[in-house]
Amino acid sequence: MNIKYNKVKILLHSILPLLVIFFLSNNNPKENYLKINKNLEIFSNIIKEINTYYINDVNIEKTIRIGIKSILESLDPYTNFISESEENYYQTLNTGIYAGIGAIISKKQNKNTIIMIYKNSPAYNGKLKIGDEIIKINGKNVKKKSIKHISNLLIGKPNTKIKISVKRYSIDNNINIYLTRKKVLINNISYSGIIEKNIGYIKLSSFTSNSSMEFSKSLNNLKNIGVKKMIIDLRGNPGGILEEAVEISNLFIKKGLKIVETKGKVKSFNKIYKSNKSTCYNKMPLIILIDKETASSAEIIAGVIQDYDIGILIGENTYGKGLIQITKSLGYSTYLKLTIGKYYIPSGRSIQSIDYKNKNKKKNINNKKFKTKNGRIVYSERGIDPDIKKGKFLFSPITINLFIKGFIFDYSTIFYYENKKIKKTKNYKISEEQYKKFLKWLYDKDYRYKNKIEKIIEELEGQLKKEKNYKNILKKIISLKYKIENNKECDLKKVKKEIKFLLKEEIASRYYLEKGAIESSFDYDKNITEAKRIFQNMNTYYKILNY
């Protein structure tokens, strides 16, 4: 009983600060301490009574965690409790560093498969390969385990040993690979290079504690080799540390200008961030690529560039996350990630698209208007609008199906082991002969899929079942389905270009890892194509910016 009681006591110490925050967020702090104390005592007594008298054994930790989750979910999606087991994950988010092997695992054909390896990581140096299926870790069979479970086994203390058994293409027996976990630095810069003549390209994937330093170094290197115009890719960037976004924004605006202002309930947390350094990049033609997954700190950079009219935004409307979080230690290696305010970019607008306090009320779609430096109209509370709307390349249903089912991935693995090398990514193309080999390999695979016409027929069939003459109509439906199925054989010819794109990207990743995959995607990237088109006609560029 004492052991159980001590466990309850420890857990209550963790949840009490959360309950205090919950009550404070819903009431006036000065008037409601009596209510807080009363309700905290009630909650504590409930847990104790459950632990002592409830008919069945109760997992007290799980029960309290459910309570924590319910409290925080009532606030917003970004206020989170970080448990002891998630501490490593939290540290990785903030620093970009973790102790592991440096590989990304995913489910492919229901197999736990390595889909990417970081260069110079333990996985890379230990000769693990993309396409390897993980069978055992330290002797324990993990074939039926989840990706999360396997990731937890792979991460550990630096310099600890780990044995991984993998199944590799064309080798009958499992291969045992012995690695030593090391601190792996996840680069914020996924790619940096020249994509055409004097046009540079940097893909910024995240904001951890060293992202601004990485970005500045990449920018300087490109400038030194003759880059005159720059494309910065913020698509898929979920944000991160605010100060890193401020430092990167500082590279493109003059000294003394406002970058972002934070406002919240606690006045001491409010702050105005200004550029504090002179820059040589404020006159460099600049294009920012954004999409629906561009969020938080990434939106600050996009908003600063747009508000000061120093660059063009191409892509989709951004996510719209303009809330600020801080992390508070709760003791016992647990933390609270807590929303404390909103940030406002130079024009004065907030980019937060959802009002969580009134999320059940009908939203007012008449967003407030603001103006950029050159007088262009921009809007608040809806993320960042691109200056040029450009969606992503849309693959056909059959191409998506081939990708999801892992056929393009598996064929690329086979290709890798049958071909020692390929040309550098920029010069590499999937030949007609290679494409025919892929189709031949695919012939006996189950790549069935439903196109738009079939989906319409299915819906129609469901409605027609209620009709009296359904049996007569059914024969015609079956005949139509048969014709569609036969026509699908022609689809592989129609989408040849799409499949070649994805084959090239997947094959290039085997030889050149992440860099190869990103370079290959340039072939079908509509946003990059549009950016290059704009840079080829600078009159259009300056006209968009109202110069």
Image: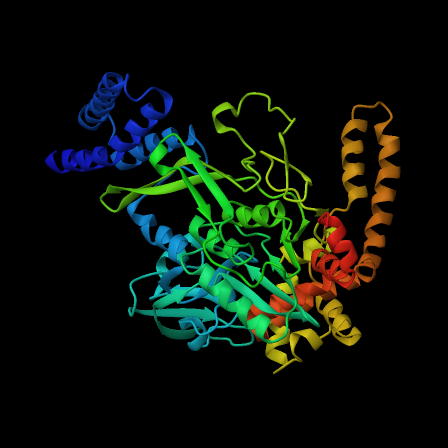
Res 407 quadrant in image = bottom right
Residue 128 position (above or below residue 369): below
Q: Nearer the viewer, residue 64 or 55?
A: 64
In the picture, measured across the screen, residue 36 lies left or right of residue 524, that is left
Please identify the residue farthest to the bottom as the structure is shown.
420
Q: How many marks?
A: 0
Up-down: is 13 above or below 162? above
Horizontal and vertical percent position of residue 189:
52, 63
Give the quadrant of the N terminus: top left
The vertical placement of 167 against 62, above or below, is: below
Decide if residue 535 is in sight here. Answer: yes
Q: Give the image location of residue 14, x and y in percent.
A: 24, 36
In the rendered image, the vertical position of residue 168 relative to residue 305, given as above or below? below
Q: Quadrant of residue 13?
A: top left
Quick check: can you spot residue 113? Answer: no
Q: Residue at 65% of width from left, 80% of height from top?
A: 422
Is 383 on the left-hand or right-hand side of 81?
Answer: right
* 141 and 333: which is toward the camera: 333
Across and down, in percent, residue 183 comes to: 35, 66
User: Residue 448, position in %: x, y?
Assistant: 72, 53
